[in-house]
Amino acid sequence: MMQEQIDKYTSEIKAFTAAKADELEAFRIKFLGTKGIIKDLFEQFKTVGAEEKRTFGKVLNQFKQLAEERYNDIKESLGAGTQAAKADTDLTLPGDGFEIGSRHPLSLVRNEIIDIFKRLGFVVAEGPEIEDDWHNFSALNFPEEHPARDMQDTFFIRKGDGNDDIALRTHTSSVQVRMMENGKPPFRAIMPGRVYRNEAISARAHCFFHQVEGLYVDENVSFSDLKQTLYHFVKELYGEDFKVRFRPSYFPFTEPSAEMDISCTICKGAGCNMCKYTGWVEILGCGMVDPNVLENCGIDSKKYTGFAFGMGIERITNLKYVIRDLRLFSENDVRFLKQFQTDII
Ligand code: DAH
C-alpha cells in the first residue's frame, strides 16, 4: 500500500516543473508541508511492523530526499529567472555608445597659442575678470581723460558706496600689472582670459571676447627680441605661406608701439571681405613696455626693459577656421561646435 503510493508520487515529483513561484509553493505544501504527503507517510510508517520498518525506512528517507532536492533545484532555477525578468534586459548586450564632445574652437586656438609660447619658455598666468581702475587703466599709463575709461566702452560696477572704481576688465593687460607688482624680474609670461566691452553685439563685435597677453621683462630686452618672438609665433601658428608687417601704432602702456598684420590667410592677399579688400589683417598689438608702467609696478626702469603684446583669440580663430560671425562662438550650436571634433584627452 505505502509502496504503491511512493511509486506514484515518485514519478509525479520527477516530472514536476514550475514556471512560477506559486506553483512551486503548491508543490512544497503538497509534499513537504506540515500536513503534506511526506508527513502523512511518516505517520503511517509508525504503524508498520518491525520487518517492514527496516526496508521502508530507507525507501521513505530516499523519497523525502528526492522531494527536497526537486524543490531546491526548481527554486534555484526560478530565482535566476525572476532576476533576469526584473532587469528586463540582457545584461551581456553591449551598452549604448555615447557621443564624445569636442573642444570649443576658442579653446583649441588658445591652447595652441599657449603651447607655442611655452616652447619659448613663457609661463601661463591669470588674473581676475573684475578689476579696479588701477590695474586696468592707471598703472598702464592711461591718462585720466582717456576715452577707453568712458562708460561707452567699460562695464563699471556700481557698488553703491560712491566708489565706481570697479569694472569688468577691458583687456588682459591688467594681468601684466598684477604680475609685475607681485614678483621680481625677469618675467616671461602669457596671460589668456576673457575681457568685456560695452559694445552692441553683431557679427563683428561682442560684449565679451578673449585675449592673450604676453610680457617679457629682463635686462637688455630689445625691440628686435619682440619682432623675432612674434615672427616665430605667427609662423608656428599659420605656417610659412604668408607675409608679416609691423605698423607703428599707439598704446598708452608701450613706447614705441606697433601693430602686427599678416597677409590675409583667406584670400592670400588678393582681397576679400575678411581683410576688407586690403590683403592684410591686423592680428595683435605690441610694443616696448613704457618705463612709466614699469615704475608704477615697482620695477627699476633704468635696469630693466621689456616688451608686451596682446591679441584677440577670436580674431586668430576666425582667420584659422574662416569664421565670419563672432556670435557663433557663444551660441552653443552643436552643428557649429561639432565641426571642431578633436581627440579629447
Ligand atoms: N590691451 C590692448 C587691447 O586690448 C592690446 C595690447 C596692445 C596689449 C599692445 C599689449 C600691447 O600688451 O603691448 O587692445
Image: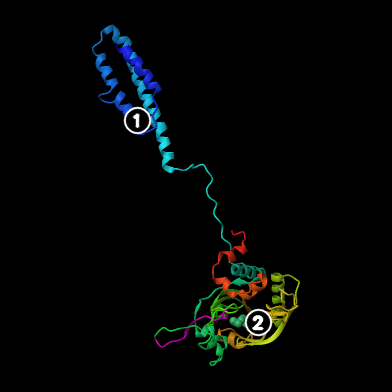
Disc number placed over residue 286 in the picture, else none: 2
- Residue at the far bottom in the pictured view: 145
Residue ID at (35%, 16%): 8
Direction from residue 322 to residue 195 in the image, left or right: left
Direction from residue 293 to residue 46 in the image, left or right: left
Please identify the dominant SS of the magenta region.
loop
Q: Secondary structure at mark 2?
A: strand
Residue 322 horizontal/vertical position (percent):
66, 71
The mark nearer the N terminus, 2 or 1, is 1
Residue 223 horizontal/vertical position (percent):
70, 82
> What range is drawn magenta here?
161-173
Q: Is residue 165 magenta?
A: yes
Q: Is residue 215 magenta?
A: no
Residue ID at (31%, 28%): 26
User: Please, what is the three-letter code of the amino acid marked with disc 1?
Assistant: Glu
Residue 231 against residue 63 in the figure, above or below: below
- Location of ligand 1 given as a quarter of the image: bottom right
Q: Quadrant of the N terminus?
A: top left
Q: Which residue is mark 1?
A: 23
Bin the neighbour count of mark 2 within 10 Å (Cα to Cα): few under 14, some 14-19, many 20 and up: many
Q: Is mark 2 within 8 Å of ligand 1?
A: yes
